[in-house]
Amino acid sequence: MGNNLLAGKKGIIFGALDDKSIAWKVAERCVEEGAQITLTNAPVALRMGAIKTLGEKLNAEIIPADATSDEDLEHLFTKSMEILGGKVDFVLHSIGMSINVRKKREYTNTKYDWMHKTLDISAMSFHRMMQCMWKLDAINDWGSILGLTYIAAQRVFPDYGEMAESKALLESFARSFGYHFGTEKKVRVNTISQSPTITTAGSGVKGFGDFFGYADKMSPLGNASSEACADYCVTMFSDLTRMVTMQNLYHDGGFSQMGMNPALLEK
Amino acid sequence: MGNNLLAGKKGIIFGALDDKSIAWKVAERCVEEGAQITLTNAPVALRMGAIKTLGEKLNAEIIPADATSDEDLEHLFTKSMEILGGKVDFVLHSIGMSINVRKKREYTNTKYDWMHKTLDISAMSFHRMMQCMWKLDAINDWGSILGLTYIAAQRVFPDYGEMAESKALLESFARSFGYHFGTEKKVRVNTISQSPTITTAGSGVKGFGDFFGYADKMSPLGNASSEACADYCVTMFSDLTRMVTMQNLYHDGGFSQMGMNPALLEK
Amino acid sequence: MGNNLLAGKKGIIFGALDDKSIAWKVAERCVEEGAQITLTNAPVALRMGAIKTLGEKLNAEIIPADATSDEDLEHLFTKSMEILGGKVDFVLHSIGMSINVRKKREYTNTKYDWMHKTLDISAMSFHRMMQCMWKLDAINDWGSILGLTYIAAQRVFPDYGEMAESKALLESFARSFGYHFGTEKKVRVNTISQSPTITTAGSGVKGFGDFFGYADKMSPLGNASSEACADYCVTMFSDLTRMVTMQNLYHDGGFSQMGMNPALLEK
Amino acid sequence: MGNNLLAGKKGIIFGALDDKSIAWKVAERCVEEGAQITLTNAPVALRMGAIKTLGEKLNAEIIPADATSDEDLEHLFTKSMEILGGKVDFVLHSIGMSINVRKKREYTNTKYDWMHKTLDISAMSFHRMMQCMWKLDAINDWGSILGLTYIAAQRVFPDYGEMAESKALLESFARSFGYHFGTEKKVRVNTISQSPTITTAGSGVKGFGDFFGYADKMSPLGNASSEACADYCVTMFSDLTRMVTMQNLYHDGGFSQMGMNPALLEK
C-alpha cells in the first residue's frame, strides 16, 4: 500500500532492535515503498533483539556489525553489495548509547574513558560508516544518507547528559562529510531531529516520562511517532528530495520553534 | 508518471506567472501526483502571464486575486471550495516583489511607503491568506501550507534589499500562524528556502547572474532547480510529512551549511 | 563609580518612559560611564512619562520625536549634534508597541492597518533612525547602534502576538543596515535579546506574570534585570566590542539555550 | 591605561604560546585591567614557547598542565588558588590541535585514534577543566568561563577538517556545563567564535592565507584581530556581562551574518 517511492532502490538500516525502534519502522516502510534492504546491528543487540522476525518478514538479510569497528563495517558493506546486487542508494544510522548516562554518573562527574566510548558508538560510528562507503565506493550517485538525532544538540536537556555532545558531533559529521559526498558523488547527508520517542533505548533515560509529556504539550502537533518518522525518512530517501543536503531537519510537531506553549501553564 | 502522493487532495497554488515560475512547476507536479487544484495570481500578473495555458493543461480554474485584498482572498477561497468540492488540503504561497528594489532605490535611501507596500505584497499576504482560511474554515485537518522564501532572511545579500526583511517577516508568520493552525486543526505551516532560481521575477534583481554563479559554486550539489523544488513541495504536501511544522527548510544543494567552498577560490 | 568606559562619547537614547524602562537604566549607566547624551521619546510618551526628572538628573536634553516621522528624526539628530557638539558615537533603540495586542485582537483576527502601524513603530523606526543618521552623516566611525529585541523573533510565544514579527523585522534591519554601516563607516549594529522584563510596557502583555515566572525558572541564572541589561549595553557601546556586528545577542540568563529545565517540573 | 574592569579578580589563562597567540593578548589585557592571573600550557608547548617572557612581564606564575590529564588539571587549579590567594573568577580556554590535519590525512581518510586524541585535546579538555573546577570548588560565584571557538562548528570550511567537530563539541560542552554551573554557582560559560587569526597554530592549516583573505573581504568590518578579541574577552570576564551565559558569541566583523559580499566578486 505504499507509493512505490523507493522502487528499485537498495539500502541498509542500522539500529533496529525491536518493534519499538524507529529503525524497525523505517525498515518496514522502505520495503513497503519498494526498496530492497539489509539490516544491521551490534552482535550483542542482535542477540537480545527480535530482529530475526523483522528480517524474515521483510526478506532482508541481517549482517552483524559493531559500528565502532572498521573491519565489521567493511564486511557489512561488502556483504550488502553482494546480497543486494550492487551499490546502495540509502543508509539509515540510528545508533546511540551513553555509558555515563547508563551508569548514572552525573554530568559533572563524567568518566572520560566512557565518554570516548559514548562518542565512538553514537557519533564517530556515523563517520566510520561514511568513510567506509567512501573507500569502498559503496553508494550510488544521488544516494541519501540519514542519521537520527535529537534537539539536545542545540539546547540543554540536563537528563540527556553526554548524549547532547554525541548528537552535536553527529550533526557536524553530517555537514562535513556531506560536503565531500555532495561534491564528489552528488550524495546527500542529512540528520532528522526526532521528537522524544518511546523506544526501548529512549525510555532508559532518567525522567523520560515527564520529559515526553512536556515535549508533547509544548509541540502544537504533539510528539511525532516513530511511524511518522519512518514516513519522513522515506521522503528523504526518495528522489523527491535530491537537493536537500547537510541539513538538520526537525521532525517534532513544532517543538523546536516554540518558546512557550500556554498549554504548559494550564493544570 | 507520479507516485500518486496527492491522490484525492485539493490545493491552491499562488504565484504562477510563466513556465519559469517555481509555482508553475509545483502546479504541474501536484496534478501529476493526483491533486486537483485552482490557480491564482494578481489580476495584473494574469494579464501579462501565460497562466491560461497552464490552467488548460492542468484542467485548473484560474481565480484572480490581489493577495493584499482580504475581499479578493475571501472570494478566492470560497470559489475554490466550490470548484474543488470542499475544503483544501494544501496551499502554496509564492509571491514576492520589492518596490524599492524594482525602482532601484538604494537600501540606505528606502522610501517607506514603498516598503510598506513591499511587506504587504511579499509577506503580509501570507498572513492574510492564512487568516482568511482560518475564518472560512477552508482547510482540512492535517492540511499543509507552504511559503517560498530565501536565505536572505538569515544572512545579508546586499542586492536583495528589503526583500530580506520581507522574507524574515514571512518566516515569522509561518511560525506564529503555525502554532495556531497546529493547535486547532493539526494543519502544518512551513517555508522552503530555495536556491536562487532563474525566474522572470528573480532575474530582475541587480547582479543576479554573478550571484547565481556564486551560489552554484558554493553549494556542494549546485543550485537547486525549480523542478527539484516542485518535487520537494510535493513531499511537504503529502501525508508523509505530517509532523513537520513551523520549519524553514533549506532546499539549496547545501549552500546554507557552507562557510567557504574551495571551488570559489579556483580560477 | 563607573569605569569610564564611555568617556568622551556622545549618544542618543530612545525610549525611556519611566524608571522601570530599560532605556532609563541605560541612560543612567551611560552617563555614569562618562558619556554625554540626549534623550528622546514620542511626544505622547513624554507627556505621560517622568522623563523630565531623568533629563535633569543626567543633565541631558530631551528632544521629542515620533520615531515614525522622518522629519522628527531629522530634527532629533540635527539638534542632538548641536547640543552634543558633534556626531554621536552610540544610539539605543528601545521602542515597541503592538496595536493589535493592545486592543486585544486575536492573532488569527489581525487588523492589517494596525499591523502596519505596529511594524512602523516597533521596527521600521529602527531603519528610519539609521537611514536618517546615514543621510546626515550623524555617527562617528566605529560608532555603535543597538536595538532591544526579544526571542519571540525566533520562537513562538503566543501571547506576544505580532510583536514577534516586529522583532524579526527589527533584527533583519540590524543585519542589513549593519552591512552598509560597517562597510562605509566601521559602525556596528547589533540587537540585544533581553529576558522578559517588568516594565510599564512589558507588563501590559496578556499573561505576562506567568510568562515571566516561566522564563525565570527556565533560565539557569534567572531572568536578567534591566540594570544588568544596561551594563551589557555599556559594553556594546564601548570600544571593547568594536568587531562585534550584525549580531543578535541574548542577554537572558541562558533561557535561549535551554530545551527543558527540570526546575519547571518541580512543584 | 585600562579601565579597571577586572580589579581584584583572579584568573587562569590556558594556551598562550607566543606573542601571536590570542591567549597571550588576553593575558596582557586582563592584567592591564587589574586582574591577577596564572598562565598554563602543555609542558611541550612551554618548552617551545616564549611564555616565560610573558610570565615575567605580567608577574604571573606559569604552571605546566596537560589539559587532557585530570591530575595535571587538579594540580593547576590547586596551585593557582594557592598563588592567587583564593578561588578564581575567570578562565580562558584557548586550546586546539588536530592530529589528522597536522599529519595531512584527508577528512575522508581519517584515522580514528587520532580523532579521539584531537577531540580530547581540543574539546574534552574544556569539560575536564570545568569538571575539575566543579569538584575543587575552584571558582567564585558569578565567575566567567570562556572558550575560543570557530564558525566551522556551524558551517563547513573543508580545510579545517576534524577541528570542525572539535569546535562543535566544545560549544556543546559550554552549553551543558553552563546549565550546571549557572544553576549551582551563578557562573557563566560562553564561547567566542573568533575570525580566522594569524597565530602560530592557525597558520598551520592548509590554504590559510586564501582563507584569511576571503573572510576579510566577506566581513563588513574585516577580520577581527587578536587584540580586539582580547578586549572582548575582558568584557566577558567583567561584571558587566553577568547574565550572558551558554552563548556562542561571534567576534568576526560580521562574517557570520553575511550571505554574500559584493566585494568578493570584484577584481
Image: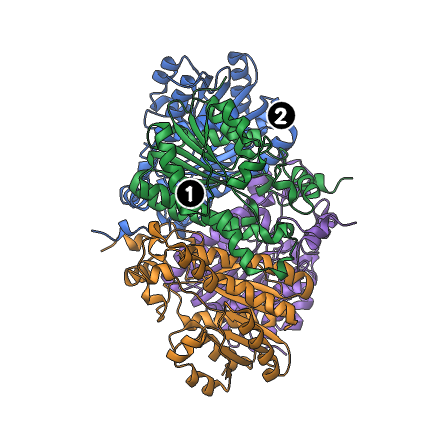
Chain colours: A orange, B purple, C blue, D green
Up-down relation of residue D1 to residue C116 (above or below):
above
Going by the numbered disc 1, the residue's amino acid type is Asp
- Residue C206 in which image quadrant: top left
Where residue B189 appears, x then y in whole percent?
Answer: 47, 59
Residue nearer the viewer, C211 or D234: D234
Where residue A107 appears, x then y in whole percent?
Answer: 35, 52
Tell me how many marks there are. Answer: 2
Evaluate whether residue C160 shows in this view: no
C112 relative to A129 in the view: left or right:
left
Q: Which residue, given by chain and number where applicable, does mark 1 sit on?
A: D72
C81 relative to D204 in the view: left or right:
left
Q: Which residue, given by chain and number where applicable, does mark 2 sit on?
A: C135
Element assignment for label 1 = helix
Up-down relation of residue A81 to residue D60 (above or below):
below
Report in which chain the residue with disc 1 lies: D
Going by the numbered disc 2, the residue's amino acid type is Lys
Element assignment for label 2 = helix
Residue nearer the viewer, D25 or C39: D25
Tell me the quadrant of the picture where the C terminus of chain A can be found.
bottom left
Seen at 51% across and 13% down, the residue is C84
